[in-house]
């Protein structure tokens, strides 16, 4: 399992480091998490490969292969089916390997859904240049209703005009535009008075934290809390683990309210 965990934690750590970058876009975060989820799914059929790699490092024998089979006392309502007893390789795969992947998949899917929900609300602020006017108006209406205390009704028309404003600029149209770049572009062109609500929407978007956990705090499953009186154990080589705390709760989460 050490070979398996090394591969899994390496991929989790790589995504975690990317998620902690200040300039990462929400859509990129969604794509990274989805790719990690697909990677985990692909591991289900690789148990034999990991076992082969482990045996190349050390000749491992399963301790229960030569144990005497224990007969369980049968009851009258047990039925006639034969009891299945797993040993060695199959036992490790069924009782440990696959459940670990299932747990990782379940928890990561839950967090990915939170990111997708937020991306559905804010995504148009970065890919508006590829959307039709009707799509922009629909997205703006949803956003305005959600942030009705901050966004004025004029936001919808502002955003449509802002798309055409961007399309007139060299190398700015027909692509996703990062919120930071879009915000600076409005200021640089002194268009704040033309797009005040767009500016407000971008400020709200830029205030989102893709992850709210960084560095040492995020390795909670792999170290003991000092408050409990036991020195913590740091996992070497993996210092950035907002995705590594799949135990009870992830340390990051996005809310829509």
Image (tube, grey):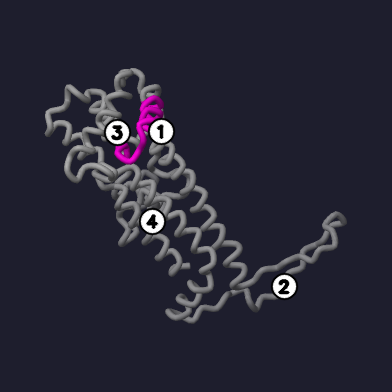
Q: Residue at x 49, y 81 (%)?
A: 59
The secondary structure type at the circle numbered 2 is loop
In the picture of the structure, the residue carrying the numbered disc 3 is: 205
Q: Nearer the viewer, mark 3 or mark 1?
A: 3
In the picture of the structure, the residue carrying the numbered disc 1 is: 255
Could you give the CA–CA distance between mark 3 and mark 4, rounded to whole angstroms?
25 Å
The secondary structure type at the circle numbered 1 is loop
First-in-chain label (1 vs 4): 4
Residue 102: x and y, percent?
54, 55
Q: Observer-nearest residue: 63 or 150?
A: 150
Do we see residue 165 in this rendering? yes
First-in-chain label (3 vs 4): 4
User: Which quadrant holds residue 67?
Assistant: bottom right
Q: Is residue 234 a member of the stretch shown in magenta?
A: no
First-in-chain label (3 vs 1): 3
Q: Residue at x 44, y 45 (%)?
A: 112
Q: Residue at x 73, y 69 (%)?
A: 70
The answer to whether residue 211 is left or right of residue 185 is right
In the picture of the structure, the residue carrying the numbered disc 2 is: 69
Q: Observer-nearest residue: 202 or 170?
A: 170
Q: Observer-nearest residue: 197 or 31?
A: 197
Which residues are the magenta region?
Answer: 125-143
Q: Nearer the viewer, mark 2 or mark 1?
A: 1
Cβ atoms under marks 3 and 1 closer than 8 Å: no
First-in-chain label (2 vs 1): 2
Could you give the CA–CA distance between mark 3 and mark 2, rounded to whole angstroms?
61 Å
First-in-chain label (2 vs 4): 4
Which mark is drawn over residue 159?
A: none
Residue 77: x and y, percent?
85, 54
The secondary structure type at the circle numbered 3 is helix
Q: Is residue 91 above or below residue 109?
A: below
Q: Nearer the viewer, mark 3 or mark 2?
A: 3
């Amino acid at each position: 399992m050490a070979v398996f965990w090394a591969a899994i934690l390496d991929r989790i750590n790589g995504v975690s480091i990317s998620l902690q970058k200040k300039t990462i876009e929400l859509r990129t975060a969604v794509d990274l998490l989805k790719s990690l989820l697909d990677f985990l799914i692909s591991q289900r059929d690789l148990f034999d490969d990991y076992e082969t790699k482990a045996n190349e490092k050390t000749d491992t024998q399963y301790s229960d292969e030569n144990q005497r089979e224990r007969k369980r006392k049968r009851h009258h309502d047990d039925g006639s089916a034969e009891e299945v007893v797993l040993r060695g390789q199959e036992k490790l795969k069924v009782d440990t390997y696959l459940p670990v992947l299932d747990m990782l998949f379940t928890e990561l899917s839950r967090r990915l859904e939170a990111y997708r929900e937020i991306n559905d609300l804010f995504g148009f602020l970065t890919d508006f240049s590829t959307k039709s006017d009707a799509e922009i108006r629909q997205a703006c209406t949803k956003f305005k209703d959600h942030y009705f205390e901050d966004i004025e009704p004029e936001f919808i028309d502002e955003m449509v005009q802002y798309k055409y404003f961007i399309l007139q600029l060299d190398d700015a149209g027909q692509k996703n535009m990062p919120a930071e770049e879009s915000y600076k572009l409005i200021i640089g062109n002194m268009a704040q008075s033309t797009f005040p609500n767009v500016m407000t929407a971008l400020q709200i978007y830029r205030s989102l934290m893709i992850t709210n956990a960084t560095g040492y705090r995020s390795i909670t499953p792999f170290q003991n809390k000092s408050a409990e009186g036991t020195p913590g154990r740091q996992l070497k080589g993996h210092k950035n683990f907002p995705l590594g705390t799949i135990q009870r709760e992830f340390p990051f989460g996005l809310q829509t309210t």
